[in-house]
């Protein structure tokens, strides 16, 4: 999550608007194939990122991972799509259609990531849970999301603790059975530990009167800003579909 | 005085036939402040789980607030009046922010949102944790987590506190805060701990678990002894006294 103290209008948007917008924008962006429409989606995503005031360093860091995979795609796609040859590497010909296709995929992927960063990362997990509940997302999905967010950090910490404990006992990963077995035990311990922790958390919740339904502290009410944002996003979606 | 808890010949046996509790008898009356000591694995946590209805005893009778517990439904009602502090605070704090976590119990008790927020603020203030409302729970220190977990159960205004090793792994200052908080409460509690000094300061009676049995209960007797000061030569205060 971004530091919400970096004041942005997106932080104050109703989370329901954000969830629906991200879903709509991502689906439409993922299926469009025309270059002008893809460019429009990407430009709109950039605008949202600017409005969200996401720190540049965080933006680059978040985009670098997915773009590494996209870069691998650039190695193959221009040479495997039939079309008009543009240049040649050894005996492989890169085609105009291949390059355009790779470019479209790159823009589409980045646009979807930017939509998510701008709209979802400016929302606190509890607001997301509340909004998902109000949007009638099945309870099990909502709770799964909620607990995954909360306990992913604990599982990572646990992994690091066990891995450190292995290293201080002179464990050095190698390509041998001992290494595979050790990592399998590590994963097994994480799994068993997470299961047992899950049971303890459930017990703790029961002790505090949990009866299967979360009661939220936030009140979600649509305001003028939400309607304006929803209208802008709907117009953009319509534009993407029409183009 | 009214019995808050009454356990009669309660036993607990694991499916592999290993007996953890054997014919345990325990009576806690209103106003009692009891301690529970015993080696690791002696059944202290199991006993607490049985009292809260989280584990089902193999045999015996449990009576809480004058009602005999038969089914989970019976426990649901009495849990509203009891608070269990877990040994590991991470098991208890699952909401993203302190405000939401402490409000979890009061909201489950049926309080409205405004009321719940007010209770959270008051509880945190009473525990010296005001300003923590919007802090992220998983980023708190071990001591802070313990205090927030404590706030989470105190916000439900229980008649009985069950504390499972509340000072384990805490620094002297945080442990001292817990002592002050418990001494300032006007409710009954039972505390499991390995720290006898801590138990002597906050309880009036100490039970000992050994090989699955609650084998003795002695009243506190005053005695004089010397020990190394926990703060050593570090600058410290004694709660402003």
Image (cartoon, coloured by chain):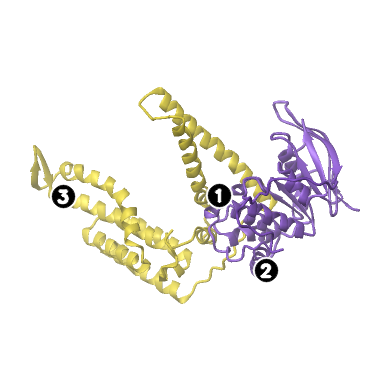
Chain colours: A yellow, B purple
What residue did someone put label 1 on?
A140
Q: How many marks?
A: 3
Comparing labels 2 and 1, the label whose residue is closer to the camera: 2
Q: How far is disc 3 from disc 1 in space, using C-alphas?
A: 44 Å
- Rendered view: A173 above or below A144: above
Query: Crowding near pointer 2: few (<14 within 10 Å), some, many (20+)?
Result: some
Q: Quadrant of the C terminus of chain B?
A: bottom right
Q: Position of residue A195 (x, y in %)?
A: 57, 39
Q: CA distance from mark 3 to mark 2?
A: 63 Å
Chain letter belonging to callout 3 = A
Q: Earlier in the sequence, mark 3 or mark 1?
A: 3
User: What kind of element bears circle 3?
Assistant: helix
Secondary structure under the numbered disc 2 in the rendered image: helix
Q: Nearer the viewer, residue A207 or B48?
A: B48
Residue furthest to the top: A177
Q: Are marks 3 and 2 in contact (CB under 8 Å)?
A: no
- The residue labelled by disc 2 is B115
């Amino acid at each position: 999550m971004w530091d919400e103290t970096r004041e942005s209008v997106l932080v104050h948007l109703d989370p329901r608007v954000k969830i629906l917008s991200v879903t709509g924008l991502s689906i439409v962006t993922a299926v469009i194939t025309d270059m002008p429409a893809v460019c429009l989606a990407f430009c709109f995503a950039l605008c949202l990122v600017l409005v969200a005031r996401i720190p540049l360093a965080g933006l680059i860091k978040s985009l670098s991972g997915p773009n590494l995979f996209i870069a691998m795609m650039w190695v193959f796609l221009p040479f495997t799509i039939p079309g008009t040859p543009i240049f040649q590497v050894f005996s492989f010909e890169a085609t105009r259609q291949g390059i355009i296709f790779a470019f479209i995929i790159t823009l589409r992927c980045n646009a979807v990531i930017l939509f998510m960063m701008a709209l979802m990362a400016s929302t606190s997990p509890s607001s997301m849970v509340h909004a998902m509940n109000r949007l009638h997302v099945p309870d099990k999905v909502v709770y799964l999301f909620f607990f995954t967010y909360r306990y992913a950090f604990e599982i990572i910490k646990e992994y690091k603790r066990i891995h450190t404990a292995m290293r201080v006992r002179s464990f050095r990963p190698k390509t041998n059975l001992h290494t595979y077995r050790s990592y399998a035990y590590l994963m097994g311990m994480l799994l068993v530990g997470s299961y047992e922790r899950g049971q303890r958390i459930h017990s703790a919740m029961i002790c505090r009167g949990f009866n299967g339904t979360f009661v939220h502290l936030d009140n979600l009410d649509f305001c003028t800003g939400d309607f304006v944002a929803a209208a802008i996003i709907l117009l953009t979606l319509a534009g993407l579909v029409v183009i | 005085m009214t019995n808050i808890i009454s356990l009669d010949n309660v036993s607990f046996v694991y499916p592999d036939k290993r007996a953890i509790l054997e014919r345990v008898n325990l009576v806690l009356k209103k106003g009692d402040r009891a301690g529970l000591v015993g080696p690791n694995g002696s059944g202290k946590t199991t006993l607490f789980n049985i009292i809260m209805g989280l584990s089902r005893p193999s045999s015996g009778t449990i009576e809480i607030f004058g009602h005999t517990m038969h089914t989970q439904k019976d426990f649901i009602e009495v849990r509203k009046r009891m608070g269990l502090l877990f040994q590991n605070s991470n098991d208890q704090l699952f909401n993203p922010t302190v405000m939401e976590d402490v409000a979890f119990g009061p909201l489950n008790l049926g309080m409205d949102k405004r009321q719940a927020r007010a209770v959270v603020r008051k509880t945190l203030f009473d525990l010296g944790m005001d300003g923590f409302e919007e802090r992220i729970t998983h980023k708190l220190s071990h001591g802070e987590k313990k205090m927030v977990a404590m706030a989470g159960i105190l916000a439900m205004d229980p008649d009985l506190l069950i504390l499972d090793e509340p000072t384990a792994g805490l620094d002297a200052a945080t442990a001292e805060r817990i002592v002050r908080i418990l001494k300032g409460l006007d409710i009954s509690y039972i505390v499991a701990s390995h720290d006898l000094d801590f138990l002597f300061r906050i309880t009036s009676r100490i039970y000992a678990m050994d090989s699955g049995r609650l084998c003795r209960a002695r009243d506190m007797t005053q005695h004089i002894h010397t020990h190394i000061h926990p703060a050593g030569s570090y600058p410290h205060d004694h709660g402003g006294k």
